[in-house]
Amino acid sequence: MDRARGPRPRPGRRLGRPPPGLGQGARARRRARQRSDRRAPRARRHPARQTPRHRRAQEGPGWRGPRAPRTAQASPRRRRPAHAVRRGHPARAHRDHARAHPLRTESPTVSESVSREALTRARRIVVKIGSRALAQDRTMPRKLAAQLAALVHAGKSPMLVSSGATALGMSRLGMTQKPTEIPLLQAAASAGQSILMRLYDEAFDQEGATCAQVLLTHGDLADRQRLNNARAALGALLDAKVVPIVNENDVVATEEIRFSDNDQLSAMVAPLVGAEALILLTDVDGVLDDDGNRIGVLDDLSRFHDRGSLTPGIGRGGMSSKVGAALKGRRSGAAVVIARATEPNIITRVLAGEDLGTYFPPKDQALRARHHWIAYTLRPVGDVLIDDGARAALEAQNSSLLPVGVLGVRGEFHIGDAIRILSIDGRVVARGLSRMSSLDVARAARKKGPELAQAIGVESAVVVHRDDLVLED
């Protein structure tokens, strides 16, 4: 065999001739059949002759079944326009995402006709009930238990944030007015918490469901390790189809370490469990405008007017607090509704998408749980004033805050403390975790390079890293 020319043909056959049994006519018929197969509809192709493109079309999520055979009367297949977006193109992915999430737009410009489809898709739901709503209807625990138990039986994971312990304790201890001394308030909360849980336990037991008591303080959520422990415990309860009944631990909480009210507690707990819906139940129809009419969808706070119940001596949170909690909740990616608690089957109907209460659509770009924790759970202990150049860099370029852009410091803080970043006019630009103490920030202000090294001993430093910084909404 000649290695340079390759193997020699077998005797009796010449290269280029058709296989035995196929003449020129048979070869022409074979080519014609192949051309016909390429023009044939997908449904008529033999599986052995399908190309990978046809197999992907049949197996992919967009496959709609075989096409009907073409007939002489059928209209010709339309060609794809020249401006059409090809499959896999980034513009098509953006369009598909917009179709899948119609409520989550870049701009929070919302009209009264916004769809509430996000509520119907929610699997984990946080419901908050206030003291005033509980005081209006003594059968409210049974009504709430019936609706929440139905959600559990439907495969969803609800959680209830309930006030009312202090009010029940005041009644049990014979108090006619809400005391102002902290020890008396703690005593009333201690006496009322057991009554409140007994009411819920009996109500859930009648519905064939189980509830569990969870008492939290602000310190539990501000400390990262205790926060993770609380997240794990709540997740285990929800996975076991148990409804957690969350309340603030008023017995050990003081003014310095307590939540402002349970509205804020619910907004902090929602991202903790990854809730897709937050329902704030109150004693009015929702957020009201200046004329006293219910606002169906709230996106412009200029339309907000606090006309909530002014019953003194029972609850701490008003409508302003609920709107603030709703804005925090929607930044975590949850759809939020403020509605009247005494409306029949209010939870079930809200989650069905009915036009009840005031709806806050979820933000398109939700904050990660850690960023939400930095922005809304941690309490800032100091402020840093920055110039316009640093403000523009933070807002437009998502950069870190450097000492050269700092004008001054207010308050005393240490490394790892939460601080606010203020513009020259006093507006809050961002919140974050400081990587320098207040003393070092004051020394390094307006300096860089050799001047910075002379002030604090290093030539480069970061006041707040961009990974620990959250811009104000």
Image: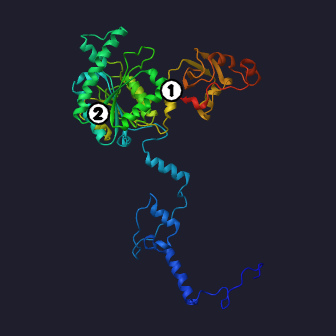
Which residue position is annotated with label 2? 210
Q: Is residue 294 visible?
A: no
- Of mark 2 and mark 1, the one earlier in the sequence is 2
Q: Position of residue 136 (x, y in %)?
A: 24, 23
Figure check: 268 above or below 66: above
3D distance between C-alphas at marks 2 and 1: 29 Å
Left/right placement of residue 80 relative to residue 274 reads right
Q: Is residue 412 visible?
A: yes
Residue at horizontal 57 percent and vertical 29 percent from the top: 469
Q: Secondary structure at mark 2?
A: strand
Q: Position of residue 306 (x, y in %)?
A: 36, 22
In the displayed image of the protein, which residue is found farthest to the bottom?
12
Residue at horizontal 30 percent and vertical 20 percent from the top: 193
Q: Position of residue 436 (x, y in %)?
A: 63, 21
Which residue position is annotated with label 1? 224
Residue closer to the observer: 250 or 233: 233
Give the residue type at disc 2: Thr
Give the residue type at disc 1: Arg
